[in-house]
Amino acid sequence: MAWQVSGRSVELCSCNMLCPCWLGPEGKPDQGWCGGAFAFDIESGNSDGVDLSGSKVVLAAEWPGNFYAGNGTARLYLPDDKTQDQRQRLEAIFTGKNGGLFAGLWPAVVQKWLPTETTRISIAWGDSPTVSVGSFGNVKLTPLKDQSGQPTRVQGAAAQGAFQITTMDLASSKGSRWTDPQLRNWQGDSGTMHRFQWSA
């Protein structure tokens, strides 16, 4: 099935600023292991004619070391305000079952998929973006800016190529938490914000 999704996303993890996994396979996570989450706010999207615009999807995962070393365990969280058909299509896209970016990426770094959860997901933007994922995660980002108010931005980091993200703005995620009973619980201070546009 042909699909396309575009919108805004945030990432955070258990490391301090900045998660070294973004910079390549030589980076060592602050605690030796890495727990992270990606939240995708789909502004425009469709899968073989099924409208996916307005959907919010979150992926959380943990790795025993650097992201590039693989052996990760991951779970997808889908929105409870969408139809079953929409959720099935979102699951196929974001787990890589329907081709595209994730079809090549996830098999290299994720060894085990936990059952997908359907839950309430909210993402709010503005000066301090927030993400809420049922009882699993609460996120608040404080974007980093210079003296003139311009965002602190990274280009050319190794993992940006893996995710096909050209630029990312850095943020603090201090106070954010992830508490899935089947994944390692964590709090962290590393956050990034991006725009994505993917298709297959």
Image: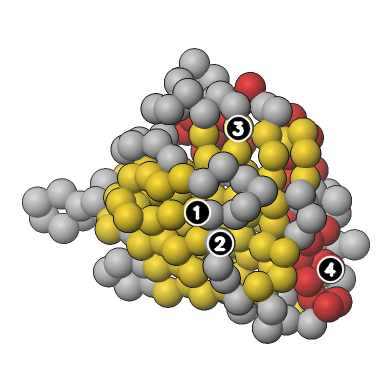
Label located before the other in sequence (3 or 4): 3
Q: Secondary structure at mark 3?
A: strand
Q: Nearer the viewer, mark 1 or mark 3?
A: 1
Give yes or no for contact between labels 1 and 2 (Cβ–Cβ under 8 Å).
Answer: yes
Q: Quadrant of residue 2?
A: bottom right
Q: CA distance from mark 3 to mark 4?
A: 26 Å
Of discs 2 and 3, which sits in the foreground? 2
Which mark is first along the chain, 3 or 2?
3
Amino acid at dot 3? Trp
- Looking at the rendered structure, the secondary structure element under dot 1 is strand
- Pick the front one: 183 or 20: 183
Q: Which mark is residue 178?
A: 1
The alpha-carbon separation of the residues under discs 4 and 1 comes to 24 Å
Would you say 155 lies left or right of 36 here? left
Amino acid marked by disc 1: Trp
Tag 3 residue = 63
x 53%, y 54%: residue: 179
- The residue under label 4 is 88
For the question of whether residue 174 can be seen, the reply is yes
Q: Nearer the viewer, mark 3 or mark 4?
A: 3
Q: Is residue 52 left or right of residue 21?
A: right
The correct choice, above or below, for 105 with respect to 139 in the image is: above
Q: Residue, x 56% and y 61% (percent of image)?
A: 136
